[in-house]
Every structure is written in C-alpha cells, then in structure tokens.
Amino acid sequence: MFFITMFFLMSFYILVVIGLAAFIPMVVFVLKMSYVVPRDQPLRLNRKRQKLYLFNYNRSRLPWLNWPVSIKVYNWADVYGEIMFSGVGGDRGYHLYGAICEPGTYNVVDRFLLAKEWEEREQLNQIWSYLCIYMKGESDLPEPRFKGRPDFWRPRKAEKWPEDMERESTTAPQDTIKP
C-alpha cells in the first residue's frame, strides 16, 4: 500500500513539473504579445520633402526575439487612400490603407494600414482628407473630432529611428548654394 501511494504521489509531482514547464512559457508568450510586441506601424509625413516614412516591423514567429526593422520612404504623389470593409471576425470593420503605386500609374506596389473603424466609414474619409490637407501645407486644418488620448492607449517604448532617417524625416531639404 505504501508503494502504491508513493507511486501516485511521484506521478502527481511529475505531472505538476511538466504542467509548469508548459504553462510558464505560455504565460511569458502571452505577456510579450500583449505588452512588448509592436501593434502599430509608425509613419512620418514630411510636407517639405513631400515624403512618407514608414517604420516597418518584419514580424517573426518567435515573439521573444527582437524583430528586425526596415524603414521605407515613399513620395507622397505616389500614395493613394483605399477604404475597404473586412467581415472577418476579429478584424471586422472598415480599414483605411495607404496604397503605393508606381509613378504615373495605378499599379499597386505596396500597402500599409493607416486606420481602422468599426462602424463609420466617414471617419476614415476625414482622416484621409486631413492627411491630404496637411501634406498640401494648408493651415486651416479642422479641429479633431475626439481630442486627447484614445481609450485603448497604453504606454510603450518609443520607436528608435536611425539617426540619418530621424534627420531626413524631420527636416526640410537643404538648398544647394552655387558660387
């Protein structure tokens, strides 16, 4: 009887250890996906250069590794706004995409997500109009509909742009002086 009890007790301890060995990495994975993995794709608009700078994460299946970053630069004249509806369960609603086309054509080369809206398509039209007015350099921009931080905002580490891209994306082009 003593040996049977010891066998079941040892089996219980082994199962607990195996369970913890499987459960702890899963908890770390979920915490990393919730608080560390980037959820957005930061972009900068430089109206002096008429360029769009896109901070793009190259996602990996291994969330505990640092994801490599590539920064793409596009001419604003080649960017078009597209609004699409998605009926997929977790991604349901309207999406505003920036479509990058080959110069002088409507052949789409790349797309990136600008904004999502659950019910109203009109708000995405307003966002795209706001971006276009901003890039034209007009000063009579409308007041934002919702001021302040969104409810879903969470503090995160700021993205670190490379030094040369930081300078280019935040400054006007330098005029060359000829003697």
Image (cartoon, rainbow, N blue to C red):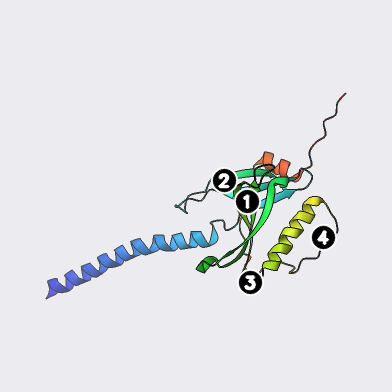
Q: Residue at x 78, y 54 (%)?
A: 134
- Whether residue 149 appears in this view of the structure is no
Which residue is label 3 attached to?
Answer: 119
Task: Point out the residue furthest to the left here.
Answer: 1
Residue under the image location 45 percent in, 59 percent down: 29
Give the position of the C terminus as an image quadrant: top right
Q: Residue 176: image x %, image y %?
A: 82, 31
Q: Quadrant of the N terminus?
A: bottom left
- Density class for disc 3 (Cα within 10 Å; few <14, some 14-19, many ≥20) is few
Foreground residue, 175 or 156? 175
Contact, CB < 8 Å: mark 2 with mark 1?
Answer: yes
Calculate the distance from the C-alpha at mark 3 to the C-alpha at mark 1.
30 Å
Residue that mark 1 sits on = 159
Cβ atoms under marks 1 and 4 closer than 8 Å: no
The answer for how far apart the CA atoms under marks 1 and 4 are is: 27 Å
Q: Which residue type carries mark 2?
A: Val
Q: Secondary structure at mark 2?
A: strand
Residue, x 57% and y 58% (percent of image)? 39
Place of residue 33 in the rendered image (x, y in percent of width and height, measured from the top left): 50, 60
- Along the line of sight, which residue is nearer the eye, 96 or 141? 96
Q: Nearer the viewer, mark 2 or mark 1?
A: 2
Q: In front of the other: label 2 or label 3?
A: 3
Of residues 31 and 42, which is closer to you in this image? 42
Residue shown at the point (30%, 64%) measured from the top left:
17
Question: Residue 151 vs residue 64: left or right?
Answer: right
Q: Choose mark 2 or mark 4, whichever is in front.
A: 4
Task: Indicate the secondary structure of the residue bearing disc 3.
Answer: loop
Q: Give the mark toward the camera: 4 or 3.
A: 3
Disc 4: which residue: 141
* Kind of residue sitting beneath label 1: Glu
- Cα–Cα gap, marks 2 and 3: 32 Å
Which amino acid does the dot numbered 3 rest on? Glu
